[in-house]
Amino acid sequence: MGTVGTLVALHAVSACVWLGGMVFAHYCLRPAARAFDPPIRLPFMADVLGRFFRFVWGAILLLVISGYGILSVQGFGSFGVHVHLMQASGIVMMLLFAHLWFAPRRRLERAVANKDWPAAARSLDQIRVIVTINMWLGTFTVLIGAGGRWL
Ligand code: HEM
């Protein structure tokens, strides 16, 4: 498969894990979990999201290593504007995710530990807003990354 092939495969799988997880959380998990009362739903959501967000850290690490790996093997000048756009929106996604992890995710876990359901619900709502933004940015990033030959 070669070095670039392996890096592109790692890159694509990591993008699938991150974007697919957000689509699942937003469109499937969240609406279904609404059926449960806050004392059940909020600890459950904190647990599920904490597990998923650890995968996201792994995906980010692989996306960065493989993305810059492809560029260093192929030559930084050998790609078109789509790679700049992917990189820019990818970095915005990563910054938003880091904020999500260090602020609302941490507050959610603390509120759940204290059984403070209104505070936990507020933090979960902040996570929802960031995940929604990242899901649409991620859709754009993947379309640009995989469909870059349109440009
Ligand atoms: C942040 C730094 C990033 C760099 C430096 C980077 C770099 C690259 C490069 C060099 C390519 C190959 C382009 C080509 O063959 O025309 C690529 C493809 C791709 N990238 Fe990125 N990327 C980054 C972030 C992301 C992110 C955050 C995502 C999605 C969440 C993403 C999704 C993709 C996809 C889906 C492809 C197409 C893979 C394929 O051809 O099968 N990239 N990227």
Image (spheres, rainbow, N blue to C red):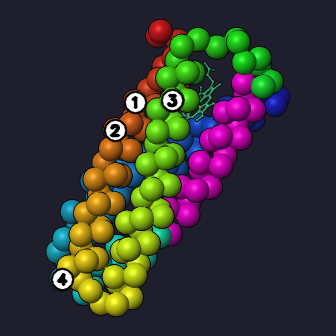
| SS label for mark 4 | loop
Q: Earlier in the sequence, mark 4 or mark 1?
A: 4
Determine whether the beta carbon of the residue marked 2 sits less than 8 angstroms from the nearest atom of ligand 1: no
At 58% from the left and 11% from the top, the residue drawn is 80
| SS label for mark 2 | helix
Q: Amino acid at mark 3?
A: Ala
Checking the image for residue 127, the label placed there is none
Q: CA distance from mark 1 to mark 2?
A: 6 Å
Few, some or many residues within 10 Å of mark 2 (<14, 14–19, 20+): some
Q: CA distance from mark 3 to mark 4?
A: 40 Å
The residue pinned by badge 1 equals 140
User: How many callouts does the rendering have?
Assistant: 4
Q: Nearer the viewer, mark 2 or mark 3?
A: 3
Q: Earlier in the sequence, mark 3 or mark 1?
A: 3
Q: Position of residue 63 (x, y in %)?
A: 62, 41
Q: Amino acid at mark 4?
A: Asp
Q: CA distance from mark 4 to mark 2?
A: 29 Å
Residue found farthest to the bottom: 114
Q: Is residue 10 magenta?
A: no
Few, some or many residues within 10 Å of mark 1 (<14, 14–19, 20+): some
Q: Is there CB contact under 8 Å for labels 1 and 2?
A: yes
The residue pinned by badge 2 equals 136
Checking the image for residue 37, the label placed there is 4
Q: Earlier in the sequence, mark 2 or mark 3?
A: 3
Residue 15 visible? The answer is yes
| SS label for mark 3 | helix
The residue pinned by badge 3 equals 88
Q: CA distance from mark 4 to mark 1?
A: 35 Å
